[in-house]
Amino acid sequence: MKENVKRDRDLVQFGQQLQKIRMGKGLTQSEAAARIGKDQGYYNRIECGHHNLAYKNILKIARGLGVSLEELFKGIK
């Protein structure tokens, strides 16, 4: 099923940064998702820019991947 959802530019940029960090750590989406207590599908939607996260989930991601909030948002304008 093809999605016809217009993705928010900020969410897409965040997802791209998250993917860059995850790949730099040599993690699969499933491994990264397990680190934050979520399933792979949820994590995939974040990387694809389809999820507007609550602050608590952003903190879980940063802590789970062992990065600062600053690094998570690096390059996002």
Image: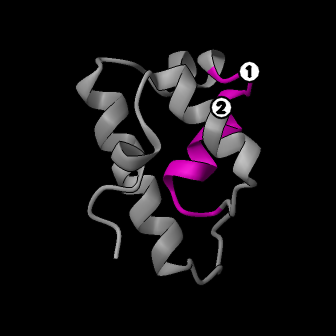
**Amino acid at pointer 2:** Lys
Q: Is mark 2 on a helix, strand or loop?
A: helix
Q: Does the magenta stretch include residue 74?
A: no
Residue at 38%, 18% in the rendered image? 27
Q: Quadrant of residue 4?
A: bottom right
Residue at 26%, 63% in the rendered image? 75
Which residue in the structure is indicated by mark 2? 60
**Dot 2, how many residues are within 10 Å of its Cα: few (below 14), some (14-19), or many (20+)?**
some
Residue at 44%, 21% in the rendered image? 66
Q: Is mark 1 on a helix, strand or loop?
A: loop
Q: How is the image coloured?
A: one colour
Q: Where is residue 34 in the image (x, y as percent from the top left)?
A: 64, 16
Nearer to the camera, 60 or 40: 60
**Count of numbered tags:** 2
Q: Are marks 1 and 2 in contact (CB under 8 Å)?
A: yes
Nearer to the camera, 64 or 11: 64
**Dot 1, how many residues are within 10 Å of its Cα: few (below 14), some (14-19), or many (20+)?**
some
Q: In which quarter of the image is the C terminus?
A: bottom left
Q: What stretch is highlighted in magenta?
A: 36-50
Q: Quadrant of the N terminus?
A: bottom right
Q: Which mark is residue 37?
A: 1
**Amino acid at pointer 1:** Gly
User: Position of 57 compared to 73: left or right?
Assistant: right
Q: Position of residue 3 (x, y in %)?
A: 65, 71
Q: Residue 45 carries which label?
A: none
